[in-house]
Amino acid sequence: MSELNKLGLAEARDALRAGDVTSVELTEACLKAIDDADALNAFVHKTPEIALERAKAADDRIKTGDAPSMCGLPIGIKDLFCTKGVPSQAASKILDGFKPEYESTVSQQLADAGAVMLGKLNMDEFAMGSSNETSVYGNAVSPWRRGNDDAQLTPGGSSGGSASAVAADLCLAATGTDTGGSIRQPAAFVGITGIKPTYGRCSRWGIVAFASSLDQAGPMTKNVRDAAIMLETMCGHDPKDSTSAELAVPDFEAMLTGDIKGKKIGIPKEYRMDGMPAEIEKLWADGAEMLKAAGAGIVDISLPHTKYALPAYYVIAPAEASSNLARYDGVRYGRRAQLAQGDGITEMYEKTRAEGFGPEVQRRVMIGTYVLSAGFYDAYYNRARRVRTLIKKDFEDVFAAGVDAILTPATPSASFGLGEMTDADPVQMYLNDVFTVTVNLAGLPGISVPAGLDGQGLPLGLQLIGRPWEEGDLLNTAYALEDAAGFVAKPGKWW
C-alpha cells in the first residue's frame, strides 16, 4: 500500500486487522510526511521515539486479536493537552520548558486504546484566537491555496495545527478543543470533519484551561466515520473532572446508518446575517436540500437570543480566562522573568506575566478582570450569564418542539490570508465565531462537515447542532450530509 499517511482511521484500522500493513509502517509514513512539511508549522514538538515505541506495542496487541479500534493509528495531539514528559506549552511563552509529570485523561484514554502519538500540534496561545496567529511557535499555515495565489492562508484557530496536519495527511486524525468554535471553524477552513461533543462528554482534566464552563475536547478527522471512531475513545466519565457526565458511551460508529428519514432539521432565521457572502448562503440552502432529499423534513425555526451570543461569550470567556490564567505567575513552574536587584514578589508577577503572555491573551485577561471587578460584575458578567441561560432555553424550546438537529453555516467566510485581519480591530476576528459560540454557551454537540468549495477553490463547511448527549444521532445526520455533499477535494501539495 502506497502513501499510507493518506488513509483515514477506518481504512487504516481495517488494513491493520487484515494484516495488509503494520502500525510501524503507518507511523513511519506519517513521520516522513511531518518532516517534509515544516513549511506548514503544524507539528511543534515531534515525538518519533514515543511514536515508534507505541506502534511496535500496537502491532503486538493487534496480533493477539484483542485490539480496540484506535489501536495502532497515528494521531497528533494539540499542545493544550498535557502529555507526560513531553512539552505542553499551550503555545505560550509563559509555559516555556514545562513538561508535565502526568497525562491528560483524553490523551491517556487514546494511549490506552493503542493510539500512536506522533507529536504535539500548533495552536493559538491558550486557545485564544481564530487564526493560529497568536502562537509562540509562529503561525500554523493551511495546506490550501487560493487559486494560483501563493499567499499563506490561516488553517483557522485555535486548533489550527490540528486542522492543517489532518488536511495535509501528516497524521490520520488529531485532537482539538473547542471553547467558541475552535474545532469546527478550523475544520471548515481546511475541508475536514470536526465535532465538539456535549459539554461534559469528554474529561477536561489535564487540558490547559481557557474558559472552564465552555471548553470541550473533540476529534478532528478526515471524515464522519473517523470522527465517530475517535470520539468514542475520547469520551467517558472521569471522577477527576467534576463536570464530567456519568453516562454510558455508545458505539457511535454502529449508529452510522445514513438513514435520516423522518428526522426534523431546523433552519434558524437569525443566522441569516447581513452581508453574508452569497456562496455561504447558497451552500446553506444546498445543504438543506440535500438533507430533504435524504428524507428529512426541513422546518424554519427561531433562536431569538442569537444576536446576543457573541457579546455574552466575549464577557464570559475572558472572565473565566482571567481567573484560570492567574496561576501562571512564575512561582511554581513555567517561565520566570529575570528580576532586578531589589525586585519583590509583585515585580516578579508583573514582569513574568508581561513577558510570558502575548498581546491577545493580555487583552482577554484585562477584559476578564474588568468585567469581574466589583463595580462591573453585575453590569457585565452576571448579565452575560443570564443571556447565556436565555440562549440555552432557545435551543431547549426548539428541541422540545420535535426538531432533531439544526443546520447552519460553520463560518461566515472561507479561510483568509495570514495577516489579513490585523490587530487594529480585534472584533473583526471575533466575528469568525458568530455561528459557533451559541453551541458552547448552550453546552450542545456541534459538528462541521465539509460541503463545497468557494469561487477560489477553498473549502466551505456546514454545521449541524444536535440535542444534548445525542452525538450518535448527530453523527448519523452528518454522515447523510457528507454522503450527499460528496466532498473529496484535497489541497494541492506545495509545501
Image: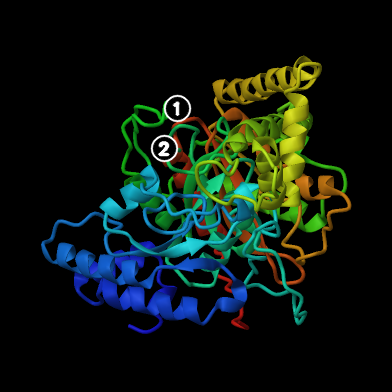
- Asked which colour scheme the image uses, the reply is rainbow
Q: Is residue 9 visible?
A: yes
Give the mark nearer the N terminus: 2 vs 1. Answer: 2
Toward the viewer: 107 or 298? 107
Under mark 2, the amino acid is Ser
x, y (%) of residue 133? Answer: 70, 60
Toward the viewer: 389 or 111? 111
Up-down relation of residue 136 to residue 378 (above or below) = below
Q: Are marks 2 and 1 in contact (CB under 8 Å)?
A: no
Up-down relation of residue 494 to residue 316 (above or below) = below
x, y (%) of residue 4? Answer: 38, 77
Q: Residue at x 57, y 47 (%)?
A: 291
Please give the label number shown on residue 203.
Answer: 2
Instruction: Classify mark 1: helix, strand or loop.
Output: loop
Under mark 1, the amino acid is Thr
User: Which image quarter holds the N terminus?
Assistant: bottom left
x, y (%) of residue 119? Answer: 43, 65
Toward the viewer: 152 or 266? 152
* Direction left: furthest residue: 64
Q: Residue at x 51, y 31 (%)?
A: 467
Instruction: Classify mark 2: helix, strand or loop.
Output: loop
x, y (%) of residue 248? Answer: 31, 32
Q: How many marks?
A: 2
Q: Disc 1 designates what residue?
A: 243
